[in-house]
Image (cartoon, helix red, strand yellow):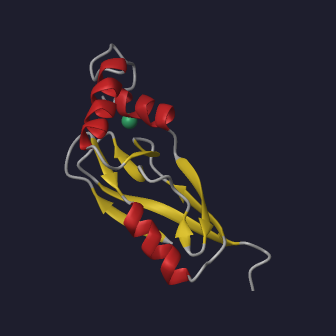
């Protein structure tokens, strides 16, 4: 299963929790696991606060401070910073499903992390039903 995303900014955190929850609902899985994978070298996925949008802003600000766009990198394409951020944040998350819902804390959301947008992107979902579920 694929979720298509169109990022609009160079660096952007996009809340994809409801898209993933919709996929879980459509698959009618009560108990299981949801594997979320981003098949790109300059985009990632993370789980973090969904209430205060300043947290997302702070994540972007700190990543940009840690890994500035200009840093004497060798990669000729000019987007080494985006590659570094992607490796740091990671390409996948695994979330439990219980009673048909993603098991997330009250303040947690799943974020697609664009580090070299705007671009058309994909998120791969693999939904696994618990063996005990009929
Ligand atoms: Zn590159």
Q: Quadrant of residue 84?
A: top left
Which quadrant of the frame does ligand 1 lie within?
top left
What residue do we see at 41% from left, 49% from top? 107
Q: What is the x, y in percent for residue 121?
A: 35, 57
Question: At 45% from the left edge and 60% from the top edge, which residue is drawn?
Answer: 123
Furthest-front residue in view? 106
Quick check: 111 above or below 11? below
Residue drawn at x 55%, y 81% as measured from the top left: 27
Looking at the image, residue 80 lies above or below residue 50: above
Say if 26 sits above or below 47 in the image.
below
Nearest the viewer among 49 and 92 is: 49
| Residue 113 position (above or below residue 62) | below
Q: Residue furthest left?
A: 8
Instruction: Tell me if 81 is positioned left or right of 98 in this view.
Output: left
Q: Quadrant of the C terminus?
A: bottom right
Q: Is residue 6 left or right of residue 44?
A: left
Front position in the image: 14 or 114: 14
The residue at 36%/19% (across/down) is 66
Q: Where in the figure is residue 25, as x and y percent of width and height?
A: 50, 79
The residue at the far bottom in this view is 134
**Residue occupying the far right of the picture:** 132
Residue 131, given in percent of the width and then of the height, sits at 79, 75
Whole-percent x, y for residue 86 in the image: 44, 37
Q: Could you say which is closer to the camera, residue 55 or residue 16?
A: 55
Q: Is residue 34 left or right of residue 10?
A: right
Q: Total of numbered circles in the picture?
A: 0
Image check: 125 left or right of 67? Answer: right
């Amino acid at each position: 299963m694929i979720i298509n995303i169109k990022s609009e900014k160079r660096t952007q955190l996009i809340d994809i929790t409801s898209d993933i929850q919709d996929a879980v609902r459509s698959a009618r899985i009560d108990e299981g696991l949801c594997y979320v994978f981003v098949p790109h070298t300059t985009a990632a996925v993370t789980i973090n606060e969904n209430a205060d949008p300043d947290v997302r802003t702070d994540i972007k600000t700190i990543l940009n401070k840690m890994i500035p766009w200009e840093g004497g990198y060798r990669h000729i394409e000019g987007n080494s910073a985006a590659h570094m951020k992607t490796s740091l944040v990671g390409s996948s998350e695994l979330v439990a499903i219980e009673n048909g819902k993603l098991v997330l804390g009250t303040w947690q959301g799943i974020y697609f992390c664009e580090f070299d947008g705007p671009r058309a992107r994909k998120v791969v979902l693999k939904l696994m039903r618990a063996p005990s579920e009929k």
